[in-house]
Amino acid sequence: MTPFEIERLDFTGSAISTWASGDERRTNWPVVYVLDSAGSASPPSVYVGETVSAASRMRQHLQSPSKAGFRRVRVVIDETFNKSACLDLESHLIRWLAGDGQFTVLNGNEGIIDAQYYARDQYRESFRSIFEQLRSEGVFQRSIPEIENTDLFKLSPFKVLTREQAIAVEQIVESLLDDLASGARSSSVVDGNPGTGKTIVAIYLVKLLADIRDYEDSDEIEPDSLFSEFFVPENRELLKSVRIGLVVPQQSLRESIKKVFKKTPRVSEDQVLSPFDVGKSQEPFDLLIVDETHRLNRRANQSSGVRNRDFAEINRRLFGADDVSKTQLDWIRARSSHQILLIDERQAVRPADLSRELLSAEIAEARRNHRHFPLARQMRVRADADYIGFIRQMLGGEARAGARPDFGEYDLRFFTSVVEMQDAIRQREREAGLSRLVAGYAWDWKTRGNKPGYDFEIEGAQFTWNRTDKDWIHSPGSTSEIGSIHTLQGYDLNYAGVIIGDDLGYDASTRRVTVNREAYRDRKGKENLRKLKRNTTDEDLLELIQNIYGVLLTRGVLGTYIYVCDPALREYIESALSPSYP
């Protein structure tokens, strides 16, 4: 590719006029530019754009109040650039800047694309060189691999949507706007397996709706965007006073998304809520988007006496009495006119989570109302075959020796030594980062509350559970600790080393995976639902533990390593993981 140039100038009318007269490419050539306010604002902000007339676009920006804080502009010029390449570079720079975290990115997310075009791979190689040049000038603090391993990047509202995600978002927004105009209430369901990007859809929706609500007539809306038709004054008016919340049941994921929203204009960390926040809210919501809906609770013994009291008080306030049949999903419905529920029926991991029957009924109702949006394309695990389906088949006892599909370059390995697996994960951490050991809850948590010592021992090696529940993956001690299900759900790893404990076994005579209730140490993971007069049977517990390992075994983007404690289960899984292909 032809070498690029990055031209730098002050963001003033006089500087732009002088600069524009020197080269025709500054007035009539596709370019990408980066505006920033470094040194003049706190926090500093950045805006990335593309245009075929840089000089004219800069003059337009100078007239826009939203660009008043910018002090400097860099224009990337390359004689081989075309419109498609510029749109692609613009999208890459926006995503990298959002993940880097040094600047607040003022762009909307409706123009983030991932289109095919001629010589795309060659152009993208040059993008990395452009990145490095900008990094040398202080526009970026981190390398691309470091950026792409951050939660700011992975949970960013500036993600590229797949075609099916984009269609779901388009149809959801279209239906919501119709409902707001008519005054009708509504409930939609986004349904998908692990790794299909349900959380990304939720985050993207919050940002997109905020952008439609707050856009200015002078903003450049990408006309080829699937969402450009929503940026009209009528929709802006419809959304002007709409109160939107994003409900995230898991504390760790909730805190991570709050950090992302804190760095994202037009949205607020206060919009990221727990189910209890919704129940206690004095003001109703117009729209609640619920991520990991399957982790909402029904009436059970909560994590503390305070939460038990809160559950009862919220029920009384919303329904007039402490009706034990009411769930946190009922709170969501009572406190909002519109709901968007993101569901995976097979990711419930505790008896208190919403039942599979209830979730199935929600999905069926959404289908009847034409508000069901299934996501099928697996985005997390970079395998060439149906990895999720194979894992669920294996955990269900349905895999046969040599049944493993060809997953291409995906690094799926079985280890007979946990120490060797630990060494391999440490090596992957040095090479790629975000490589962690995780396990099912098959050992007591002796060090809870940061007590000294270790929690369990395998093959003479001592292991300690995660010492924090919040953002464990990025915590300083995570590389030497074992992550539990409650630190992993909703997150990605590059490599996951999964220890399957004695809570699962295998009966070779019946060819069935079995549960060991005694070995499963999560007290709340197996307790009965006394308020509902419902016992947690061994069959219930087996399904929940299979769900837990299903989550743990689908976290690794580049690879998954497996060690099994129970001898019979180890033999079964090792045989199932033996490839039938050369």
Image (cartoon, rainbow, N blue to C red):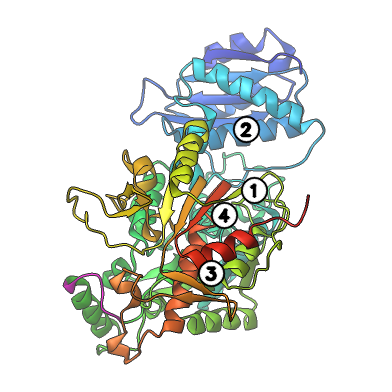
- Left or right: 295 in relation to 3: left
Reading the image, the residue beneath label 2 is 90
- Left or right: 320 in relation to 554: left
Choose mark 2 or mark 3, whichever is in front.
Answer: 3
Which residues make up the magenta segment? 300-305
Identify which amino acid the numbered label 4 is placed on. Answer: Pro
Reading the image, the residue beneath label 4 is 233
Q: Position of residue 489 (x, y in %)?
A: 44, 58
Reading the image, the residue beneath label 1 is 382
Residue drawn at (72%, 51%), measured in percent from left and top? 384
Choose mark 1 or mark 2, whichever is in front.
Answer: 1
- How would you classify the magenta stretch by its main secondary structure? loop
Q: Earlier in the sequence, mark 2 or mark 3?
A: 2
- Rendered-image quadrant of the N terminus: top right
Reading the image, the residue beneath label 3 is 344
Residue drawn at (54%, 19%), measured in percent from left and top? 134
Choose mark 3 or mark 4, whichever is in front.
Answer: 3
Q: Quadrant of residue 370?
A: bottom right
Q: Position of residue 423 (x, y in %)?
A: 45, 39
Q: Position of residue 262 (x, y in %)?
A: 37, 44
Q: Earlier in the sequence, mark 3 or mark 4?
A: 4
Whether pointer 1 and pointer 2 mark residues with C-beta atoms closer than 8 Å, the reply is: no
> How many C-alpha atoms fall within 10 Å of the one at disc 1: few (<14), some, or many (≥20)?
some
Identify which amino acid the numbered label 3 is placed on. Answer: Asp
Q: CA distance from mark 1 to mark 3?
A: 20 Å
